[in-house]
Amino acid sequence: MEDKKSKRGKFLLEVIVLAALFILVQYLITTGLLNRYYQINLTLVVINIILAVSLNLINGFTGQLSLGHAGFMAIGAFGSVIISTLLGYPFILGIIVAMLAAAMAGFIIGVPTLRLKGDYLAIATLGFGEIIRVVLQNIDYIGGPAGISGISKMTTWPVLFISLMVTMVVIVNMINSSYGRAIIAVREDEIAAEIMGVNTTKYKVLAFVVGAAFAGLAGALYAHYFYIIKPETFGFLKSFDILVMVVLGGLGSTTGAVIAAIFITVLNAFLQEYAAVRMIIYATILIIVMIYRPQGLLGNKELSYKILKKIWSGKNASSTNK
Amino acid sequence: MLEFIQQLINGLSLGAIYALIALGYTMVYGIIMLINFAHGDIMMVGAYVGFFSISILGSNIIVAMIFAMATCAILGVVIEKVAYKPLRNSTRIAALITAIGVSLFLEYVVLYFLTAQQRVYPDSAFPLHKYHIAGLVISNKDIFIIVSAIILMIILQYIIKRTKTGKAMRAVSLDRDAAVLMGISVDKTVSVTFAIGSALAAAAGVMIGLYYNTINPLMGIIPGLKAFIAAVLGGIGLVPGAMVGGFVMGVLETLVSGYGSSMYRDAVAYGVLILILLIKPTGLFGKNTGEKV
């Protein structure tokens, strides 16, 4: 009974904190205290969090290395723009279509490729991601290589906030459910999981489809903020960007993915003018993290109040010892 | 029909280049089960070394190629020692991500120091000459590329089949633990493999410089991927497979851009990859081995 009560209290606290955050940012935007530069980076932070958390579901929790996440983002971006800009339907329908289209692509790609293992899967998803890009470049209806411009800006802070919350709630709850346990079992040992009666193909495809759908969502948000989209934006370098976030944060840690996405986006903002330096730093991060901490900075641990408290009390204890 | 044969000839020199790159992929994979994503970028470094030795040192194409091969052999060994060796016992995904890191690192370090500007391979190194035979056009570049690629492949075959080092390489790729018990130094063998693979990639880099005339720091990505596909097509880990796969990919690519749309040229390569992975993941020459628990 006591436990249930404290859980409810914690949930309430979380809702209050998040609502306060939402209102605060909204206030800052409407009063103009948060200028355009910060707004752009805030938008990128949210989009990158969605991308990193959704890729983490595939790469980190299911253990299936996918290098084609940008392809699903592209499908979401173009799908939503076709609905909203070219056909003139409301944005919300665009978002739904984006997610459905990306999920469908995820299913079509996932069913055959997820039979492959490890590095073969990585290459196959990389290939599919590139095929998506090349095909988009060859469709005249969506502007070919030039892409679509003149997309009206509809990704506002409330839209971003709700999208982020939906992503987090769906993915975190999925991981903490029986689905999540099955997915983690597949990562830990596929053969053992299969023997225990887990339908490994089903769960792998499920994780892939859900991850793809949220990548589609991120694509739709991206397209409706930046006015113009080109297929080449969603090349495999974009996929690597997202991979860096997931690897840095920890393969299998949602909070890790969130922190890494924020960190990388801020780093990007600072190194905007030094693209080459940025990529060298990325590359070095990838290599060093893999050599010294192959499970990522947070590993598969989640940052929670408990751990924070522990670190805090540990620090206090050590300082009193001195 | 004449046009078809012409396309075939054009495809052969491209295929020879792919085959050389694919050999490096396949050798490394055969020994440490790692897709060396940075392999295409080693090729890029080779192209640059070749470029500078022609334009600054004024060497001829053969010297430039040897120079590039030596430099990249060292580079390959260094990369293996620094980045891949610490990961030899960790998961394959960790190794793969590291390889992606190394690839990005090479690309952008070169980009940083030499800028993204395209560089034109000096014509003086290899004056173009075209021969017309029975309605077909063959350039001396094509002949040079194909002949030198074949010579390199013969040398490689000799090393693998007839020398002690080659024997060690074959032993390590067959069973690493047993090889250690037989007194073979795995570290040394892996280093030699990286050196040979990288040297072949460097030769391919100089050839790509001749073939496309221009080089840039990101030139390694696409040929690298295609060569990897060639290696998978032939059966990754198998040296003859990589050669055949490379030629098939090269010919296929020129046929697609000759008859279809050149926009789809790259997509076809990925299509081939996915088809082969779905139908016969072990490649054309590979044998099926069941997964053991």
Image (spheres, coloured by chain):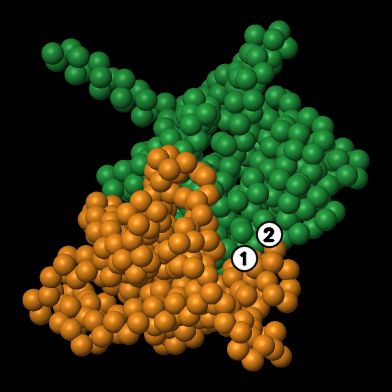
Residue occupying the point 64% across, 25% down: A40
Q: CA distance from mark 1 to mark 2?
A: 8 Å
State if disc 2 and disc 1 touch (CB < 8 Å). Answer: yes
Residue occupying the point 74% across, 26% down: A156
Q: Which chain is green?
A: A
Reading the image, the residue beneath label 1 is B266
> How far from the left and from the top, in percent, is residue B86?
23, 54
Secondary-structure class at tag 2: helix
* Horizontal relation, residue A258 to residue A112: left or right: left
Secondary-structure class at tag 1: helix
Q: Toward the viewer: A23 or A156?
A: A156
> How far from the left and from the top, in percent, is residue A254?
49, 40
Reading the image, the residue beneath label 2 is A134
Crowd class of label 2 (few under 14; some 14 to 19; many from 20; radius 10 Å): many
Q: Quadrant of the C terminus of chain B?
A: bottom left
Q: Amino acid at mark 1?
A: Asp
Snapshot quadrant of residue B62: bottom left
Q: Amino acid at mark 2?
A: Val
Snapshot quadrant of residue B144: bottom left
> How far from the left and from the top, in percent, is residue B175?
23, 78
**Chain letter of disc 1 in the image:** B
Q: Which chain is orange?
A: B
The vertical placement of A172 against A107, above or below, is above
Crowd class of label 1 (few under 14; some 14 to 19; many from 20; radius 10 Å): many
Q: Quadrant of the N terminus of chain B?
A: bottom right
